[in-house]
Amino acid sequence: MRDHPYVAQPGYAKWSKAVTRARISDVDPVVQGRFLVGVDDKVVTAGSCFAQHIARRLSASGFNFHVTEKPHPLIAPEIAETYNFGVFSARYGNVYTSRQLLELLLRAQGSFEPLESHWLDDAGKFYDPYRPAVHPGGFASLEELMQDRDQHLRATLRAFEEMDVFIFTLGLTEGWISLADGANFPSCPGVIAGEYDPDRYQFINLSVEQVVSDVLEFIRNVRSFNPTFRMILTVSPVPLAATATDQHVLTATSYSKAVLRVAAELISATDPERIAYFPSYEIITGNFSRGAYYAADLRNVLESGVDHVMKLFFRHYTSADVEGPNNLNNTLPSVHELDQMNKLVRVQCEEAMLDAGL
């Protein structure tokens, strides 16, 4: 037998052993975590729709999901949930792009105040352009919106100041900005509220270099006042609901996820002791599952997929004896099981509205 570098490679480095002959529930692309998250560590989450699953599971498993923007104690839990309290650490809604994340920090610090203050809907209600889906039905007045935003940004900065671990899920490269000052929006104007005007708004599609630059600037900024925080990057496995490019949505999705995956690798390589990439994207999209982790729309992630992701997160990134619900199996779900699992997929997602009714 000839000697070459691949002979001594471990089983996880070889497709036949790590994927082909492995049970679905045993596929583990993490290999080894870079650091451990303690049950008392203050964990702050942000990102795309998929990040909501991570936040929900951390909280349910007894970890310190750190929430700094909380509802009034007299508000009923179901109403608080409707108004997006506790979905993320603060009510910033989905932060789809790296540019949104950086601007969120700058706005919370008071070093950037976008010129566009509000959007209106057909009923004359006021919406926050930078989190338009957070307050369903809109605000009654601009004054109410501004007061809520001020409180929100203070809570956001406090979350960044106090966090021990920050989990950020990179979701999209496509976005919309204001031509007046470059401010980024989580949703195209006109989808939820506001009016689309090509003379006021511009479509952008971030490159690897731009994503890396945005996130590294965010890290440097936070480290100036919170020098010890650690960061876990993930890439959302949820495909684009729609693309504003002149491409098929499949190829547009492939570009977006490839950019984010490469960017995450480059960012994590800058500080291997304090920045990690967690492969939730590979766990959900890997062909070993034959697509079984996706709902009937082939876009939303089922609870069984979240189970697999979180089982490996707890195994490699915590010392706690938490494996998550053990409902992973090695066969494809039946139609009835798919219908039941579809009912469990409950995430707030502005991006999904791009495809609504079209």
Image: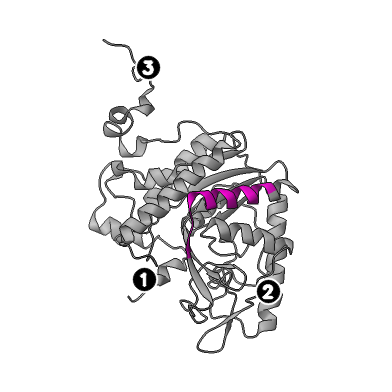
Q: For the residue carrying disc 2, how many other residues have a C-alpha within 10 Å: few (<14), some (14-19), or many (20+)? A: some
Residue at the spot of label 1: 355
Looking at the image, the residue that sits furthest to the top is: 1
Left or right placement of residue 115 versus residue 23 in this view: right
Q: Is residue 8 above or below residue 207?
A: above
Q: CA distance from mark 2 to mark 1?
A: 29 Å
What residue is drawn where x is 59% and y is 58%? 101
Residue at the spot of label 2: 148
Q: State which tag comes first along the sequence, 1 or 3.
A: 3
Which coloring applies here? Answer: one colour
Q: State which tag comes first along the sequence, 2 or 3.
A: 3
Disc number for residue 253: none
Q: Secondary structure at mark 2?
A: helix
- Camera-nearest residue between 61 and 3: 3
Q: Is residue 331 above or below residue 248?
A: above
Q: For the residue carrying disc 1, how many other residues have a C-alpha within 10 Å: few (<14), some (14-19), or many (20+)? A: few
Asked if the residue at tag 3 contacts the one at tag 2, i.e. Cβ–Cβ closer than 8 Å, the answer is no
Q: Is residue 206 magenta?
A: yes
Give the x, y percent position of residue 227. 72, 43
- The region drawn magenta spans 204-220
Picture quarter containing residue 140? bottom right
Looking at the image, the residue that sits furthest to the right is: 225
Q: CA distance from mark 1 to mark 3?
A: 49 Å
**Chief secondary structure of the magenta portion:** helix
What residue is drawn where x is 67% and y is 43%? 229
Q: Secondary structure at mark 1?
A: helix
Give the x, y percent position of residue 83. 57, 71
- Camera-nearest residue between 189 and 13: 189
Q: CA distance from mark 2 to mark 3?
A: 59 Å
Residue at the spot of label 3: 8
